[in-house]
Amino acid sequence: MKKFIVEPEFWELFPETKIGIVLAKNIDNSMESSAEIKKNLDEANENAEQFLEAAVFSENPVVSVWRKAYQKFKTKKGARSSIENLLKRVDKGKAVGSINPLVDIYNSISLNYGLPAGGEDIDTFAGNLRLTKAVGGEHFLALGDDEADNALPGEICYLDDEGAVCRSWNWRDGQRTMLTEQTKNAFLIIESVDPERGEVLDAATQKLAELSEKYLGGTAQVLLVTRENPEISLD
């Protein structure tokens, strides 16, 4: 039985973090994104402007809260949270574009709610998925790269038995576990380090599950991981 486990080393740094999970099973991600999914993504790009009211980009609350979090662990130089990377594109007038239905859906959620969101193919996991501090040297080949760029000692990463799944918390996904058109079972995740945004996280996770079922079929189970409930079954 595969599990997702957030280990004590993580909670020591981020005791108030909440992680919303959607287990999307028996989905069909094989088609091109529908006009409606693309429209939702276009609207989300526009809605994201609400998180960019500060004159200085890094002073926007949904950006600064993650900047502060990233100061607490070892990262690759220049690594930023996924929500910052999306909002930076919006801020520069470069809309987040379509990739595939499931990625478009979670990107629209991320932009609409101002939270990092991502996803992996459950069937590619080697053993349990863990969120923890890397020992260092865990193998990682990022999306779009040709050469491995392995994890650093003390870096917060999603790891399985074969290496790193996502580096610097939610910065970059790896090729081995990425969502593709062939994905049938997906691990979808939304993260909040801000204890004041718990209700926003809950709403975002529910909406992600709703959209997954609506557009991709299958089932979508919603779960919440906290320090008090640090592991879930992926089966």
Image (cartoon, rainbow, N blue to C red):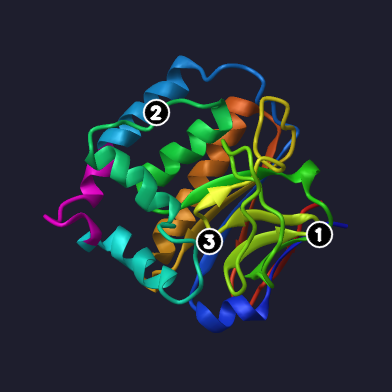
Residue at the farthest right position? 1
**Precedes in sequence: disc 2 or disc 1:** 2
Q: Nearer the viewer, mark 2 or mark 3?
A: 3
Q: Name which residue type carries label 1.
A: Asp
Q: Secondary structure at mark 2?
A: helix
Foreground of the two, 148 or 143: 148
**Precedes in sequence: disc 2 or disc 3:** 2
Does the segment drawn in magenta span residue 48?
yes
Classify residue 37 as left or right of residue 7. left
Q: Which residue is mark 3?
A: 168
Q: Residue at x 38, y 22 (%)?
A: 39
Classify residue 55 as left or right of residue 63. left
Label drawn at residue 161: 1
Q: Label 2 to label 3, Cα distance in Å?
A: 28 Å
Q: Which residues are magenta?
A: 47-58
| Any part of residue 114 in sight | no
